[in-house]
Image: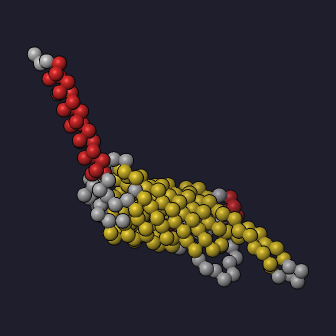
Amino acid sequence: MKSVYHLESDKMKKNILILWLSILSLNSMAQIKKNSIYLEALGNGVVYSLNYDRIIPISNQIKLVPRLGFEYIPRSNPSVYGKFNVPIELNILYHQNNSNPNFAEAGLGLGLFSLFNDYKYSMVGDITEKTYKLAKVTTLRLGYRHQKPAGGLMYRAGILVRLTQDEFSKSRVGDDLFYVIWPGFSIGYTF
């Protein structure tokens, strides 16, 4: 029969082992580089977008990835379309282990697109001021992402599915700009 001292010592050893394993698992989750900047062709920006995202580890296999992007098209005389778009997205990455650079990617996105809203005439009949309003389109992304745990080159490809489109954008561009399904391709750097 063990003494009280031995029981307490065994309990302390067990707690130290659990703490040590917890620190090791947190350290292994922290090994992957978390920040990425990349250029996406097509995708949520429709033409292109410059993006930043950050990986938030949930477990060794699952990562949460919020993303923010920006597209600017210098139009000299914009008519229906404005000059900028802002894609926002929340993705989930899944992979087998931290040494595997290949991820399955799924997420929800919100695209904010500047579209022509109204205008004002001058005394001589010229248009003096145009106003723009943000159109909103939500998307579902399904895709593939390659990102080495140590960082460096990253690339991704996916299919986007339009889930909703607000009435303002439907009245301005219909379904011509926001297709039901379209691809997105990204290349960038992880650090």
Total labels drawn: 0
The x, y position of residue 108, in whole percent, is: 50, 55
Q: The C terminus lies in which quarter of the figure?
A: bottom left
Looking at the image, residue 73 lies above or below residue 170: below
Residue at image x 33%, y 70%? 153
Query: Hey, which quadrant is residue 31 in on the image?
Result: bottom left
**Residue 134 horizontal side relative to residue 54, left or right:** right
The x, y position of residue 90, in whole percent, is: 48, 55
Task: Choose between 111 and 68: the one closer to the eye.
Answer: 68
The x, y position of residue 168, in whole percent, is: 69, 61
Residue at image x 16%, y 21%? 5
Residue that protrudes farthest toward the front in the picture: 5
Task: Choose between 3 and 71: the one closer to the eye.
Answer: 3
Residue that protrudes farthest toward the top in the picture: 1
Q: The N terminus lies in which quarter of the figure?
A: top left
The x, y position of residue 65, in whole percent, is: 43, 56
**Residue 103 horizontal side relative to residue 164, left or right:** left
Residue that protrudes farthest toward the right in the picture: 123
Q: Quick check: can you spot residue 46?
A: no
Residue at image x 67%, y 69%? 115
What's the coloring here? secondary structure
Residue at image x 66%, y 63%? 134
Looking at the image, residue 78 lies above or below residue 99: below
